[in-house]
Image (tube, grey):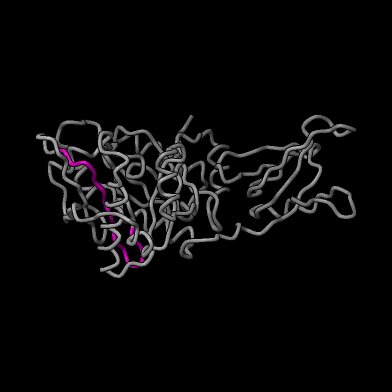
């Protein structure tokens, strides 16, 4: 990271650069001999009253006193992506939303309030793609009341780390007392290499809907061991072209060894609910499910793949690395503190 001209540190940005991606260096132990420095890269979200606020890819704002700022500059809006299909933040976010439709939704300007009786944060959070038509603080008050009327906690989903993402909104949410509760990665890849993964797909069964066996393996609703409610089935069945995969297990209870879900939407194929029973892992079943679903998506004209995975799910991240998926952006769910 180069900050100097002729060996001197320089601050080459101003408050007029709010909204741009910047790289800054601050002194953390005085400014004299032996001073220590720390660097931050992110979107400059405010510069007021002698305090610079920068929101990095992590989504959590960093506030720096102007007096400790020793260097800074505007940098390109996003790092070059070395692999994966070209995709804007908004295109990919809208495709992901269509693949996981809520039971109920309501518009607040360009924000979309979503509720599904509490089944997953994605289907019970605000998708804020645009202007709410009022000051953010007022909009957040309406959001809280809307979810309170439904007996649900209020969440706002916001993304960071890609050109056109929502670092400024994340900073505003923090300014209004909202805090991140969970972070996930949205990853993308070319679809054909996923379909060509070395896997035996002969045992993978594809269907247009769920059945009791598939649901017995699925672990994302609140009543494991019981058939989920209609709200869960409605969300699972939503999307332009939905496919469910399962690999039969060997036990008498009929629980599949592995399952998966794919939604085909134009050029995109989104992969969700890929789960393998603990006793069946390290047999390539997750790869087989992905490959079988990818081949079906190719048959329907898709060419690009996406998936979402929580940022702390190390085993899943490693598996998707091996499959060729690269991080496109992060998304976060914010909740009032």
Q: Residue at x 24, y 61 (%)?
A: 241
Which residue occupies the extreme left position in the image? 252
Q: Residue at x 67, y 42 (%)?
A: 53
- Residue 255: give x, y in percent of width and height: 16, 38
Compared with residue 148, is residue 89 higher up or lower down, i.e. above or below?
below
Between 218 and 22, the one nearer to me in the picture: 218
Name the quadrant containing residue 292.
Answer: bottom left
Between 128 and 133, the one nearer to me in the picture: 128
- Residue 87: give x, y in percent of width and height: 47, 63
As for residue 266 lying within the magenta part, the answer is yes
As for residue 280 lying within the magenta part, the answer is no
Between 258 and 116, the one nearer to me in the picture: 258
Q: Residue at x 38, y 62 (%)?
A: 193
Between 150 and 300, the one nearer to me in the picture: 300
Please state if 136 lies on the left or on the right of 219 as rendered. Answer: right
- Residue 59: give x, y in percent of width and height: 55, 42
Q: Residue at x 30, y 60 (%)?
A: 294
Magenta segment's dominant SS is strand
Give the extent of the magenta segment: 255-269
- Residue 182: give x, y in percent of width and height: 45, 36
């Amino acid at each position: 990271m180069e900050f100097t001209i002729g060996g001197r540190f320089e601050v080459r940005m101003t408050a007029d650069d709010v909204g741009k991606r910047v790289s800054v260096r601050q002194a953390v132990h005085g400014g004299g001999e032996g001073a220590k420095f720390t660097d931050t890269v992110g979107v400059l979200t405010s510069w007021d009253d002698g305090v610079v606020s920068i929101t990095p890819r992590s989504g959590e704002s960093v506030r720096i006193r102007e007096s400790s700022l020793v260097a800074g500059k505007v940098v390109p809006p996003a790092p070059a992506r070395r692999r994966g299909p070209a995709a804007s933040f908004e295109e990919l976010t809208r495709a992901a939303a269509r693949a996981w439709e809520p039971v109920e939704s309501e518009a607040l300007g360009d924000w979309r309030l979503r509720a599904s009786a509490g089944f997953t944060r994605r289907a019970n959070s605000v998708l804020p793609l645009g202007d709410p038509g009022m000051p953010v603080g007022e909009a957040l008050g309406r959001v809280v009341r809307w979810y309170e009327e439904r007996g649900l906690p209020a969440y706002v989903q916001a993304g960071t780390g890609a050109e056109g993402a929502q670092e400024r909104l994340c900073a505003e949410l923090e300014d209004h007392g909202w805090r991140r509760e969970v972070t996930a990665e949205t990853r993308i890849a070319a679809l054909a290499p996923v379909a060509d993964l070395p896997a035996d797909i002969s045992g993978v069964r594809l269907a247009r809907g769920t059945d009791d066996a598939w649901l017995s393996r699925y672990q994302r609703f609140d009543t494991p061991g019981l058939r989920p409610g209609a709200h869960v089935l409605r969300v699972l069945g939503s999307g332009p072209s939905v496919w469910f995969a399962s690999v039969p297990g060997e036990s008498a209870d009929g629980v599949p060894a592995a399952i998966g879900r794919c939604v085909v939407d134009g050029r995109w194929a989104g992969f969700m609910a890929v789960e393998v029973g603990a006793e069946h892992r390290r047999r390539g079943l997750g790869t087989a499910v992905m490959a079988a679903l990818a081949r079906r998506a190719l048959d329907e004209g898709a060419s690009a793949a996406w998936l979402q995975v929580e940022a702390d799910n190390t085993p899943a991240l490693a598996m998707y690395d091996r499959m060729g998926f690269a991080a496109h952006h992060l998304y976060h769910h914010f909740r009032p503190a």
